[in-house]
Image (tube, rainbow, N blue to C red):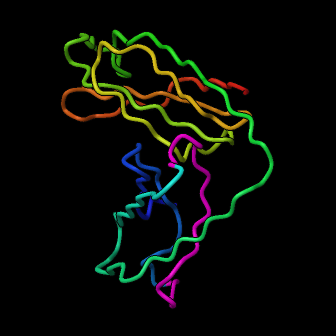
Amino acid sequence: MEDEGELVINGNPAIPLFGSAGSVANDAKSTNILISTPASYWQDANNTLLFRHTRTGGYVIYDVAVQFESSTEHVVTGSVNLSWIAPVAREDETALPLAQIKGFRIYYGVSPDEYPIQININGGNIDEKTLNDMASGTYYFVLTTIDMDGRESGFSEMVTKSI
């Protein structure tokens, strides 16, 4: 299913949203979306949530109700350090000079088949990223390369990290 939109929490990287919002099958013109976010996205006081629809078919969001569920359990968090080597060739084997790399995109999630969270890395010379305040669990990561024309490569090999 294609992304229906994205959620931005307190200016953090956008989280793609999936669902049937705005589709013919959604007669009530509403949807419930359950997402998991890194703990670092949230502040102790007020939080700003921005919903952006990317495939609205003309529908407009008139009212947004947000319900939070929290746990009284102590949540263990940790960090994940990711590093990579910039590719020297495109998928078709033509040369890809470092000057032609605009950046990278990290995709990750808790399933080896779905990567709902993405982080954009601006700059072809950047080769590492640390993700802090990650809840305990196993995460699956892939990386893509973005060239100066905005073209995105296919996924890298998947890497698994546990916290």
Q: What residue sits 41% from the left and 13% below the top?
A: 127
Please identify the dominant SS of the magenta region.
Answer: loop
> In terms of depth relative to the viewer, which is nearer, 149 or 15?
15
> In terms of depth relative to the viewer, which is nearer, 34 or 149?
34
Splitting the image into 4 quarters, where does residue 32 fall?
bottom right
Splitting the image into 4 quarters, where does residue 128 fall?
top left
From the viewer's perspective, is residue 146 above or below residue 61?
Answer: above
From the viewer's perspective, is residue 42 above or below residue 48?
Answer: above
Q: Kindly give the residue lying farthest to the bottom in the view shown.
A: 27
> In terms of depth relative to the viewer, which is nearer, 157 or 18?
18
Q: Position of residue 47 (x, y in %)?
A: 45, 57
Q: Is residue 125 left or right of residue 84?
A: left
From the viewer's perspective, is residue 52 above or below residue 145?
Answer: below
Q: Position of residue 31 (x, y in %)?
A: 54, 77
Q: Is residue 72 left or right of residue 116?
A: right
Q: Kindly give the residue lying farthest to the front in the view shown.
A: 45
Q: What residue sits 40% from the left and 50% below the top?
A: 10
Q: Position of residue 158 (x, y in %)?
A: 61, 26
28 inside magenta stretch: yes
Position of the C terminus, as image quadrant, is top right
Q: Is residue 68 left or right of residue 125?
A: right
Splitting the image into 4 quarters, where does residue 136 fall?
top right
Which region of the structure is painted magenta? Answer: 25-43
